[in-house]
Image (tube, rainbow, N blue to C red):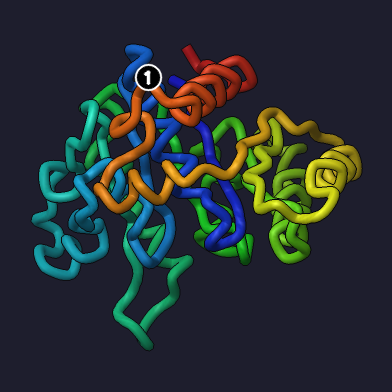
Amino acid sequence: MRKIAIYGKGGIGKSTTTSNVSMALSKLGYKVMQVGCDPKADSTGALAGGKKITTVLDSIREKGDDVTLDDIVTVGDGGVLLVEAGGPTPGLGCAGRGIITAFEKLEKLGAFERYAPDIVIYDVLGDVVCGGFAMPIRDGYAKNVFIVTSGEKMAMYAAGNIAIAVDNFKSRGYARLSGIILNKRNVEDEEEKVRKLADDIDSKVVAVMERSPLVQDAEALGSTVVSAFPDSEMAKHYTELAEIMLKESDDDQ
């Protein structure tokens, strides 16, 4: 089983990238589970017909110890298994702690044993890499980390912090940084800036994703580009990215 974490600053297109990669992998014949690790619980919408699914934390608040896997795992488009960690009640609790609680519940209920996915992809907010947001890195849930960034200053700043966090846990045999995905925003000298960042953090740019109106068109349909516009160039690029991520990631089996 491959275990991949995709990090990036909020709003950088991380969830869009993750969902399209998940859909592409499913079309390539893999059984995929996507776990959203953002308190907004908006990682999986494009794979769930544009709707928000019930989160792990919401289920726990409603059912307590009676929560089952059927309550927290949804089968989405293409058979992709969807999980949203969710967040605490606004003003109460810690979002990072919520992710830890969700991960512990999935493990306790034997989610990976029951569904036996070929690939698990964690979609993780990377603005602050601490507490629960570092779970996929530090506790062995993920083996490989990919960072989505643009050439914008704050996006690259977040990418640098994520790389530092990954490096800090490297000696413990946890996740390793496997590459940078440039999601272009038409910033001046964007590709040059991001390639320099990759060099500075001892990594590489594994894919350059051009801007496309099809991304917004697919989102308006509550879908992914790969599903809604399968014959488009953008769908082809997402499929190529999925294949690159497979090549650059480790298989535990």
Q: For the point 25% across and 47% down, which residue is it?
A: 221
Q: For the point 78% across and 63% down, which residue is it?
A: 153
Taking the image as shown, residue 220 lies to the left or right of residue 2, namely left
Q: Nearer the viewer, residue 28 or 246?
A: 28
Occupied quadrant, residue 137:
top right
Is residue 103 among what the camera can see? no
Residue found farthest to the bottom:
91
What percent of the width, then of the height, locates residue 240? 54, 20
| SS for callout 1 | loop
| Within-10-Å neighbours for mark 1: few <14, some 14–19, many 20+ | some
Residue type at tag 1: Asp
Report the residue marked by disc 1: 118
Q: Is residue 186 above or below residue 205?
A: below
Q: For the point 31% across and 21% down, which residue is it?
A: 31
Q: Is residue 185 above or below residue 119?
A: below
What percent of the width, then of the height, locates residue 198? 82, 40
Of the 4 image quadrants, the one containing the N terminus is top left
Occupied quadrant, residue 171:
top right
Q: Nearer the viewer, residue 208 or 234?
A: 234
Taking the image as shown, residue 235 lies to the left or right of residue 165, namely left
Taking the image as shown, residue 118 lies to the left or right of residue 152, namely left
Q: For the point 14% across and 59% down, which residue is it?
A: 65
Q: Is residue 92 above or below residue 79?
A: below
Is residue 2 among what the camera can see? yes
What percent of the width, then of the height, locates residue 121? 44, 36
